[in-house]
Amino acid sequence: MRRVLPLFRRSLADTWRGLVGWTAGILAALFLYLPLYPSIGGNGQMKDILESLPPELVQTLGYDEITSGPGYTQATFFGLIGFVLVTIAAVGWGTSAIANDEENGQLELTLAHGVTRGQLYAERTAAVLAKLLWLTLVGVAAVLVLNEPAELDIALDGLLATATAFFGLVSLSAVAAIAVGGMTGRRTWALGAGTGVAVYGYAVNALGNQNEDLAWLHDWSPYSWAYAEDPISEGWVGLIWLLFAVAAALLLIGWLVFRRRDVAV
Amino acid sequence: MTERSAAVTTRGLIKRYGSHTALHGIDLDIPRGRVFGMIGPNGAGKTTTMRLLLDIIRPSGGQLQVLGEDPRTGGSSLRRRVGYLPGELHLQARVRGRELFAHYAEISGTVRAGTVESLADRLGLDLSRPVRSLSKGNKQKVGLIQAFMHEPELLVLDEPTSGLDPLVQQEFHAMLREAKDKGQTVFLSSHVLSEVQQTADDIAILRSGRIVKLSTVGALRESAVRHVHVVVAEADFAAARSALIAVPGIGELAETGDDGATRALQTTINSHVDAFVKAIARFDLVDLTIEEPDLEETVLGFYGTDETATDGER
């Protein structure tokens, strides 16, 4: 009667309430913001407002493209509200996967059973990524539903490209929290790593936006790898793959340390 | 080959945490089918030893075999043959007891149908309540059931009765006897001797990461300190006193009473009960009391005080 992926299923079963909450949050954000596009972004007045704001602020928020449907969706959801919300979820789940479980003493008991450390690490990572993928798909579905009524005029290819970049970006924060949790077993370190990756990426990207002399900073920001080339309008461009490559490398390092170290000391 | 190997064998087992050494080379042999108790004060290394068996932590030196395999390489298949109760049990799961056991059953050895229910019944645990809402004692029952439910070849139980009321403790002791009758091996730890005394065949006393005494409970009892109380006639007192001083293993003699006609003496003796009785039998005894051996006192003697305080606390 042994079924597959026991730890993966356990993780999902333990956190489905949270997932429902985040799903509702994503939908609420999208259904509040996107229908406003015809009256805000598509309206010539918005351009005037943006021109009256300090350019540094506009560039930091990524609102320079806000007057097109794809630009508006990118600036409000994928680049800001959605990014913040799902990053919070990602870091929380990533921290829980190993570090939190270890600090509150439950990991010891699980590992004393018939599972290997690699299996636990892999299944719990898969559970976090599956939940992030779900939230991304919810976002994609909501944008598709609103595309016509909100006059967004987003091409499917661009939407999938930016959603992939989005998924890669939030996964990188989650994976940083999982891997550092795997290496140290400390909640604060895991939390700091996940949050740090997101804040660092956003800040460096914003600095890189300020002027041409600082544009090289984009090479060093995961946020820029995801969005600097404007995938929602341009499709599969930029360094989206690099997000996944770095995440994979982090996971590997985390696993190598986790399988060797003492747990719960 | 595996069948004949001891349940647990360690040779020179060392565990260091940074500059602090938790285990200074432990040699243990736990034969199959025995109940082996390990006692020692807090920080003596009991939990460290048990975690090493489960591969939760890794040795810094020495050898370790569990059911004939190295825990590092035995992996998940070895751990399915072991039941473990951690010393600090934390159960925060929102799920009900029944679901939690179903989950643990998936990642441990085969659990026969009805086992969880019958264990829960014996210990008095409500399986329909969310685990995190249970009291400490009831969480401990959850921990015990998940350790016992797949009838593992080896049970590793770190302070198993902590938080249990006396009735449940008795039921637990019965579970230990049944496990032993079925040929399972039990390795349990405690900081109270009485528990180990009631359940274990063999005993190891651990202090500051070293085994200071390995013995059977029976042998420990024989060698244990007994308090004796002797009342002799006034006329015999001086002679009795000098006769007693010559008895091997006798403690300090204290005079505890003098009513003019008789005088009372109090002292301790160890295993030399025979020599003591023969030495005292020559005199006119008014009263003689030999108390039950006090194992606790014997064990405290092994614990010591000075070294433990400096080494064990780090």
Image (cartoon, coloured by chain):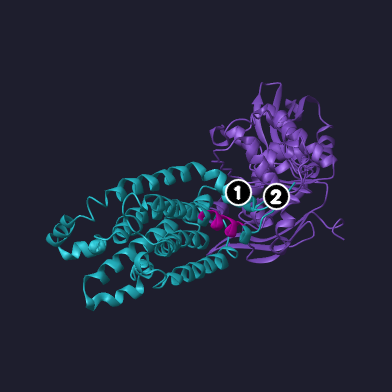
Residue A3's tag is 2
The chain ID associated with circle 2 is A
Q: Which mark is residue A189?
A: none
Q: Nearer the viewer, residue B42 or B172?
A: B172
Residue B89 vs A98, above or below: the answer is: above
- Secondary structure under tag 2 reads loop
Which portion, as a residue range, is magenta? A120-128
Q: CA distance from mark 2 to mark 1?
A: 10 Å
> Which colour is chain B painted?
purple
Q: Identify the mark nearer the N-term, 2 or 1.
A: 2
Q: Quadrant of residue A56?
A: bottom left
Say which of B38 and B159 sits in front.
B159
Query: The chain coloured cyan carries which letter?
Result: A
Q: Position of residue B294 (x, y in %)?
A: 71, 36
Question: Which amino acid type is shown beneath numbered disc 1?
Answer: Arg
Callouts 2 and 1 close, C-beta under 8 Å: yes
